Structure formats: C-alpha cells, structure tokens
Amino acid sequence: MSTTRDTGRPIRRLGFLTLGAFDRADPATGLDEGLTLFERAEAEGFDGGWTRTRHLQFGISSPVAFLSAAAQRTTRLTLGTAVMPLGWENPFRLAEDWGTVDVLSRGRLQLGVSVGEPRGYDEIAQHLYGDASEHQDFSYARVEKFLALVRGEHVSSFEGVEGIERYTRSVQPQSPGLADRVWYGAGSPRSAAWAGEQGLGMLISNVSFAGAPGEISATRFAESQVEQIAAFRAAHPAGQEARVAKGAVIIPTDTASPSQRRLYEEYAESRRARTSVAHGPRGMMFDRDLVGPSEWIVEQLASNAAMREVDDLILELPFDFGVDEFTQILRDGANHLAPMLGWSATS
C-alpha cells in the first residue's frame, strides 16, 4: 500500500455519490444497480453512500424512497443526500418521511439540502404547488422550518385521545439527533456563513461561483472554496472542528482495464471545455475531473488549497458508466486512493 501523503487535514470519512441513472424503458434495472453499489461500498469499508436528486431526469427523483431501500440492504453505511433541493419539497411531509427513514436505518441519515427556486419554475409551478405556487418561500426559511419540525416543534395545539385515535403535537416519528446530521450545500461565502450560523455541516461540490464569467483555473476554483470554508467555520459554534465534506469527480485507475481507462479519459476530455471557463452572470465554475493512478491524484489534491481543509471526501460517480466500472472506482478509491489521504476503512 502506498505511503500517506501530507494533504492537510486527514480524510475522516470516505463516501461515494451515485445519480442512480437508468434507461427510460427499464428504470428498475438502473435503480437496482444503484442499490447494489451501496452494498459493495459497504463491503469495501466506505463510510457513506450519497444520492443527488434528479427531477425530470433519468435518475433518482425520490431519494426518500431510494435511501429507504438502501437502508434495508446495508447495516453500517450512512445514507445521504448531496443535495436535496427543498424548493421542490413540503417541509412538513419531508420531516415525516425522513424521520421514518432515519428510524428504520437506526440513525444513519446524513441529509444535505439546498434552497432556491426550482429550475424552470414558471413551467412546473402549477403542477408542483397549484394555486399556492405564487406564495412559496424559497429562502433559508424553508430549511429552518424543516429543522424545527424534526426537532419537535409543535404544529398542533391538541395532544391526546379522540375516540380511539391518539394524537400528538409534533410530526412523527421523531428521530433524536436527525437535526444534527443536516448539511447545507453551499456555493458562496454568504450561504456558507449562514450554514455555519445554523450549526449545520457544509457540503461543497464540483460547482462554485466566480462572480463573473470568463476563464478560470484550478487554483481560482480552490480559492473560491477556501473562502467559503473559512466563512463557514468562522460562523460555526464548533469553529475549526466544524465538518466540511467535498464531492468531486475523482476516478482512480489503479486496477482499471485498458478499455476502462480509455472510457474514463474520453469522459474527462468531453467535459474539459465545461471545466475551463466560468458560465453565466454569476460565473458558475466546475471543478476539473481527476482521472489517473491514485499516486497522481493525491499529488493533485495535495496542491489543492480547498482539499487540504476537507474532512470528508465524496467520490462522485459519473452518470453514464456501468456497474462494473463503478465497482472498480469504489474498490480503488478505498484500497489505493483514500489511505494515502489519511483515511482508514471501517471494519
């Protein structure tokens, strides 16, 4: 096994993220393969498995249902969302759903959330909220309401028995500790500071914002995320101990076959134009993909200022590969890459 390198804070927890891609004509196969990855990741010693919500796409549109199934096929792996956009959700119903999954999984949820108006809202608003579509609040208040509900906020003045039915003032089931396992998907110093003030965990991904369009570099992207991490920890009650998890498309090729390596390199090349410039009025940036032997990937991460501040690493699996490719990436991530970043597998 390769020697551990100085890459800043050691990686405390290793996770992976799947989009659960499926064929339009056969969604069951793709979703079941996604669940299989949770089983295989647990066997390799991973700490967590994560999903990303994909509305109106051929991927996981209901992480509640998907992770409920994953909870029944694993025993130790934490189950996360990175992230679930709350603009599509009712906080009351979500508190009931996630409370149920957390109880069934014995407290294994790690919930990453975000706020903002859903993409294409003008078209979907009536389908999503009907006549109430013009009165929705897509601000941080949506997260605050969800947190209050999972902490037991009273929503009814009545508690007791009516006929043969027993009622309570709070949404049920209550799962103690769930609110302490909520993360926020930050993309700017402002949102990062807000997450810190709330005492949440912070998720950063392969997306950030430069403030203006134009060419970018890996250094500029990392600097942007360092700025966010600093704002988050400065505002968080735990200070420098506040947890930050980073998701990135990282594909170790240590045991990959020649055909798999070609596939991965072609994939990264197809995305290079997207990752070299900032897009749109806010300057949306995408982190570069890292494809290669673990030794080389660790060298790249060691020079990444943001990566040196991260506690948890989440390997983001691309959309279009097969279960064999995903399994190889997970295996090399756990057996070659992560140990060089200071991580040790959970037995």
Image (cartoon, rainbow, N blue to C red):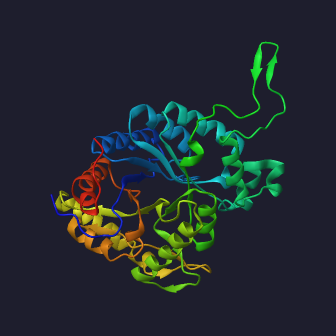
Res. 157 visible in picture: yes
Please identify the quarter of the rendering in which residue 187 is found: bottom right
Up-down: is 331 above or below 226?
A: above
Up-down: is 318 above or below 296?
A: above
Up-down: is 216 above or below 30?
A: below
Which residue is more in the foreground, 187 or 8?
8
Res. 90 visible in picture: no
Q: How many marks?
A: 0
Q: Residue 142: x percent and y percent?
A: 71, 54
Q: Residue 9: x percent and y percent?
A: 36, 65
Which residue is more in the foreground, 5 or 208?
5
Q: Residue 121: x percent and y percent?
A: 71, 60
**Residue occupying the point 35% across, 59% down:** 11
**Residue occupying the point 28% across, 60% down:** 342
**Screen quadrant of the N terminus:** bottom left
Q: Residue 199: x percent and y percent?
A: 59, 57
**Residue occupying the point 54% across, 52% down:** 53
Is 114 situated left or right of 320 in this image? right
**Residue occupying the point 83% across, 56% down:** 135
Is 255 situated left or right of 106 in this image? left
Which residue is more in the foreground, 64 or 121?
64
Residue ranking furthest to the bottom: 214
Residue ranking furthest to the top: 164
Is 344 situated left or right of 49 in this image? left
Up-down: is 339 above or below 303?
A: above
